[in-house]
Amino acid sequence: MTDITGGQDASDEDLMLSYAQGDAAAFEQLYARHRRVLLGYLVRQLRDQAVAEEIYQEAWMRVIRAREGYQVSAAFRTWLFTIAHNLVLDHYRRQGRRAELVLADGDELPDLADTATPPPEDLLAGRQDAEQLLACIGALPFAQRDVVLLRLEAGLTPAEIVAVTGADPEAVKSRLRYAVQRLRKELQDGD
């Protein structure tokens, strides 16, 4: 077994490869790096702490089970959030809540040429009322809430969100832009 962890500077992918070779400390580092963000994403996405914790545990169990066959084909973070995203979709399907998975009525996609909408992180960076913001995010339709949480909570790039969700790149951009527009309106109306 080769120890390629290299301490705190090792990439997630190197840690996972090291874990695949039997280095349990590498897994501990991966878990420590991603536990807070992954659980936060799941809690905000599912809006149920107990269910989020169950899915969180299942996501990590899938990482553990996949370790021996792991190959670097994408960033570890992207792979981890793809697992979590798919578990969320499975949860909603099992609950018969397919309506959660579609855009809300009247949820037309905005004109992508509209560049007046700032990036989500700029819009949300200065908000003082985190509870109001989280409530507004929680009220978004699933597809919009998903991309916003993957962007803001997980810090994924739009390209990584495309990989996680399997959505078209233009759809991801549209969902982000429309979600930001809705959040801006809700937050302005709430002031």
Image (cartoon, rainbow, N blue to C red):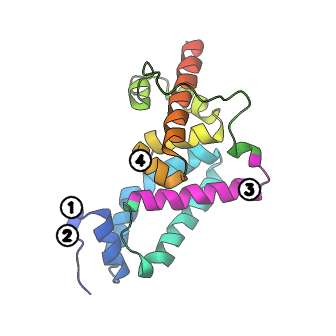
Span highlighted in magenta in the image: 77-98
| Mark 3–mark 4 distance (CA, rounded to whole Å) | 26 Å
Is residue 22 left or right of 103 when viewed as pictured?
left
Please identify, in this view, whether the residue under mark 1 or under mark 3 is nearer the observer.
3
| Mark 1–mark 3 distance (CA, rounded to whole Å) | 39 Å
| Mark 4–mark 2 distance (CA, rounded to whole Å) | 28 Å
Q: Earlier in the sequence, mark 3 or mark 4?
A: 3
- Magenta run includes residue 57: no
| Mark 3–mark 2 distance (CA, rounded to whole Å) | 41 Å
Q: Earlier in the sequence, mark 3 or mark 2?
A: 2
Q: Are marks 3 and 2 in contact (CB under 8 Å)?
A: no
Residue 164 horizontal/vertical position (percent): 50, 54
The furthest residue to the bottom: 1
Residue 85 horizontal/vertical position (percent): 56, 55
Residue, disc 4: 159
Q: Amino acid at mark 2?
A: Gly
The residue closer to the viewer here, 114 or 74, is: 114
Is residue 169 left or right of 32 when viewed as pictured?
right
Mark 2 nearby-residue class (10 Å; few <14, some 14–19, many ≥20): few
The answer to whether residue 63 is above or below residue 131 is below
| Mark 1–mark 2 distance (CA, rounded to whole Å) | 6 Å
* Numbered tag placed on residue 9 in the rendering: 1
Residue drawn where x is 46% and y is 61% of the image: 80
Q: Amino acid at mark 3?
A: Arg
Q: Earlier in the sequence, mark 4 or mark 2?
A: 2
Residue drawn where x is 21% and y is 67% of the image: 7
Residue, disc 3: 93
Q: Say whether residue 148 is visible.
A: no
- Magenta run includes residue 88: yes
